Structures are given as structure tokens and as C-alpha cells.
Amino acid sequence: MPTKDGIASTTRTDQIALVTGANKGIGFEIARQLASRGMTVYVGARDRGRGTAAAEKLQGEGLAARFIELDVLREETIRAAAVAIEAAHGRLDVLVNNAGIVDRGDGPPSRADLDAVRRTLLTNFVGPAAVAQAMLPLLRRSPAGRIVNVSSGLGSLAQNGDPEWPGAWAKFLGYNASKAALNMLTVQLAYELKDTPIKVNSADPGYTATDLNDNRGTQTVEEGAAEAVRLALLPADGPTGGYFSSAGPVPW
Ligand code: NDP
């Protein structure tokens, strides 16, 4: 039955998801795939124009998508987003911390621009931590809360230290450290929440063609979104505190 905002009522229509950085790239595709399963998806974006356009594109496909302003560097937008979702639904079922940057000044430890390192840590690690803290009270009200932190294979200390790993050339001090730190958020938050239904996991999308890498990635956004979507939809007996790519667990 259609609701007052025209959203078709299906078995999962009452599930509420928030995806940060969802106006393009992998985040947009995660939003699309979650909404395709009947969820109401908040398309988090720092820019109103880009976010509204993305949400309208999904609405045009018949999906329940809504723009919400959320800049992970601006706490007032994070707080306002939590207040708005609480007012509309009283809870949140899925949080995907997807927003992230690569800074042009980043690079190997001997010469990375340290302001670029600071900016990257703030966006890719402190930002997601702030969003998780703000949304946690709402996720606690879900019968099956799920937090997915979109990490990277570059966040693996084990892979960074393995000269034979195919991604070993990619030594970006700020970016790789930010994703390792994000993995720490996953592990510690999962531990804190181990006696609750909430599951917290890191997803490694794999090298995906988006603006982040000037579309040099070798995967499609559908492939890049797949693991985060799987982790967002984990059943009650699924893992928590893990780090996964589509190929399986990633070494920390
Ligand atoms: P894109 O550059 O296409 O998208 C990044 C998104 O993050 C954009 O929506 C961007 O918004 C948003 N964003 C950046 N800064 C902020 C901020 N301060 N507040 C809110 N949103 C922000 O990159 P991808 O889709 O490739 O990246 C998505 C995630 O996947 C990132 O976390 C990235 O690190 C990770 N990842 C990507 C890989 C790849 O190969 N593409 C591989 C491994 C991990 P705006 O449009 O306004 O800039």
C-alpha cells in the first residue's frame, strides 16, 4: 500500500538507512542497492544541489530516497541529520560510513604533505567516528542495527607490509592510515556493542572506477558497492568486528 509520500509499502519499507557521501560513486550505488531492497535511504551529501539531484535520480527509479545534508567535517550537520531522522522515524537501521577523500598532497611517508595527511584523517576517520556517535542512539532503537565502515584494502597493515601484495605500490600515508584507523573504529565499536544486536564491520570495496581515482579503478560501482551492501544486510548470526571484501576476510 502506498504511504503518504508515495513510497510503496513492501516487507522492508520500514527499514531506514543512511549512507554518507551518497551523491556519487560507490556511496550512490550503495544507496541505490539498499533502496532497491525496499529500504528508505537517506542520501547523505555535503552539497545540497548534488545531494538533491542524486536523491531525485533514485526517486525517478521508483526508490524511496531522500536527500539529507551531512558534511562529516561539520558537526552541526551531523547533529541536525540525527535530529531529522529521529523526528521522522525514531530510529535508524543501517548506517554506511562511505564518505571519503584522497588528497592530492598525500604520498609516501618521506614526503607526504602533512596538512593533506591531517585533512584525510579528519574526513576518513574522525568524520565517520562523529557520525557513528551521533547515530548510535538511533541505531540502538533498531531491532537489528548495522554499521558499515567503507574502508579499503589500503587500510590493511598486513597488506601494506607485504611487498608482494599487488597494491603495495600505493603508499599514501594519510589515506592508508585513515583507513587503518577506521578499521580500529570498527573493531572497538563492535567490542563495545557486542552484547547488543548491532553489528559493525569494515568493507573493502576493491579498486573501483570513480572520481576518487580519476576513474582508473578496474571494477564497476556495482562491484564496488556489493560488499558494503552485504554487510548492511547481515542476518542476526552474521559477523561483527570484521573486515571483508567480496573475496572474503581481509587480513588486518
Ligand atoms: P567518490 O570521490 O566518487 O565519492 C566520495 C564521496 O564522499 C562523494 O559523495 C563526496 O562528496 C563525499 N565526501 C567527501 N568529503 C565529504 C565530507 N566532508 N562530507 C560528506 N561527504 C563527503 O569516491 P568513491 O565512491 O570511490 O569512494 C567512496 C568510499 O570508498 C570512500 O570512503 C573511499 O575511500 C572508499 N574506497 C574507494 C575505492 C575505489 O577504488 N574507488 C577503493 C577503496 C575504498 P562530494 O561529491 O561533495 O565531493
Image (cartoon, helix red, strand yellow):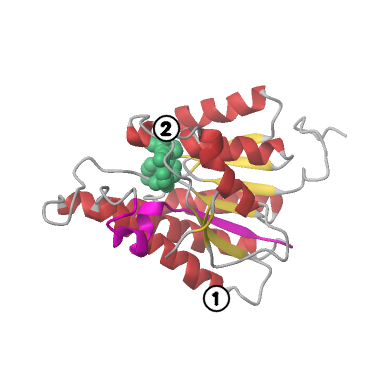
Instruction: Assign a secondary structure to mark 2.
Output: loop
Which amino acid, mark 2? Ala
Amino acid on which disc 1 is placed: Glu
Q: Looking at the picture, how far across and down is residue 103, in whole percent?
A: 26, 43
Residue shown at the point (64%, 66%) measured from the top left: 198
Position of 216 with respect to 205 (left or right) is left
Q: Give the magenta-colored segment's residue range.
A: 143-165
Q: Residue at x 67, y 38 (%)?
A: 35
Relative vertical location of residue 52 with respect to residue 156 in this rendering, above or below: above
Mark 2 Cβ and ligand 1 under 8 Å apart = yes
| Coordinates of residue 160 in the picture (x, y in percent) | 30, 59
Name the mark on residue 224: none
Q: Which residue is mark 2?
A: 209
Rendering coords of residue 244 (x, y %): 52, 57
Nearer-N-terminus badge (1/2): 1
Compare residues 18 and 167 and report the one nearer the observer: 167
